[in-house]
Image: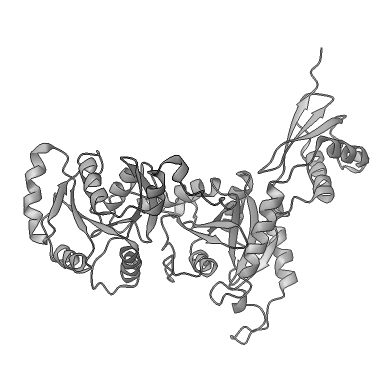
Amino acid sequence: MLAIVGRPNVGKSTLFNRLIGRRRSIVGDEPGITRDRLYGTANWNGRELRVIDTGGIVPNDKDLIPSEIYRQARVGLDEADAIVMVVDGRTELAAPDLELARLLVRSGKPVLLAVNKIDTPKLESIVEDFRRLGIRQAFPVSAEHGNGVAELLDAALKVLPVVADEAAASQEPDERIEEPAKLPETKIAIIGRPNVGKSTLLNQLTGTSRAIVSPIAGTTRDAVDEVVERDDHRYRFIDTAGIRRKGKTHLMAEKLSVVMARKHLEAADVALLIIDATEGVTASDATIGGYAHESGRSVVIVVNKWDLVGPGRQDGHPPADQALFEKQLRAALKYLNYAPVLFISAASGKNVDRVFTAVQRVAEERRKRISTGEMNRFLKSVDFERASSPGYGTRIQYLTQAAVAPPTFIAFTNRPGKLHFSFQRFLENQIRRAFGFEGTPIWIKTRGKQKP
């Protein structure tokens, strides 16, 4: 495993993205954009290597978030087999660079120096100015343009150990060890407003201090993911940045993080929508839930910080009623009436185990398929006269499930055009009553009979 480290704003995330071949880290001109450590995979000369992007390290900085970044980076360093220290070739060496280099060399692990932002061959001589850091192998690179990255990777492969999987791949076919079957994986995006407890929940679910947690809203910027194997299943949890309305984001990094959060949401199977029990359901919660619903993700609504308002609260006020809170929540999030609701405390861990059960249940419902025969027997059993608006003479002649994840149905009707909204809602409710589909939106498309 190869760790990329350096002071803030030297180009670590740009190099990380270059190595793994895609935009995984948020990149910008503001220092300190990367805060949690991020993982990716690079392939070079037939070998695969894991790469860690760490937050900018400023040794001995005692501020809350910088010290947490430093702790996260140290975890990455402990996991790594080799380290790439990145410096900005366009700036003078500073005391933090020298201090960081001493820490890295003292670790006893192989260290490579990448002098970044060397965009033309004329600037390559600048590398000699950085020999004072005491790192023998130094490479001029331009992470933005890719110059020098090949030489850096060649050197990295020489010092990285060959892992068992690579050794097996180099054996003759009859000597290879049969790989165990991969566990099924469900991707879960943890979404919500800033500071509702998303990172705390990720840490509880994974049993780690994987994500930086602080009382400062907007601490998480990149999406941080972690895999948990449990009951013969893999759960990939993705802690996304807090999503705010466009007008509420000012820094470029925050705006990018919101875009990336929605992108990661759309790559997930299930969304955990986190609601802060102490604040109730807000308009922003409704907007974020709408993103998940419209994208076709399955949804579990998680009411966090229930210990602060429910039974056992310590502030002397009477405890909130769970049934009443859920009723108010359902009224505010009508379009998520299919989503189960959990009441938890991420800080204490109370009821967090129920998240796994709910996620597994809605993930299975999301992938459920109903045969055409069952669908048409169901269709005959529905009393469409009960619909508040029967669709102005529209009749469904045939109904079939065309896709899963999310469940998608095609209704063949006697006339062209979409189903009336109330008629479609009635049909969806009848499908749920007959077949379940808990936690997942249902999409209904129509194909009308064309006039001759």
User: Does 251 sit left or right of 445 as displayed?
Assistant: left
Residue closer to the observer: 106 or 99: 106
**Considering only vertical position in the picture, is 40 above or below 395?**
below
User: Residue 64: image x %, image y %?
Assistant: 34, 72
Horizontal relation, residue 452 to residue 274: left or right: right
Quarter occupied by residue 396: top right
For image coordinates 55% across by 61% down, the residue present is 229
- Residue 142 visible in the current orientation: no
Give coordinates of residue 362: x percent, y percent.
68, 54
Residue 422: quarter of image: top right
Q: Quadrant of residue 78?
A: bottom left
Confirm whether residue 61 shows in the render: yes
Indicate how the structure is coloured in the image: one colour
427 versus 133 height, above or below = above
Residue displayed at 27% across by 52% down: 12
Whether residue 220 sits left or right of residue 86 in the image: it is right
Q: Measuring 41% from the left and 44% from the top, which residue is drawn there? A: 169
Instruction: Indicate whether 222 appears above or below 317.
Output: above
Placement of the N terminus among the 4 image quadrants = bottom left
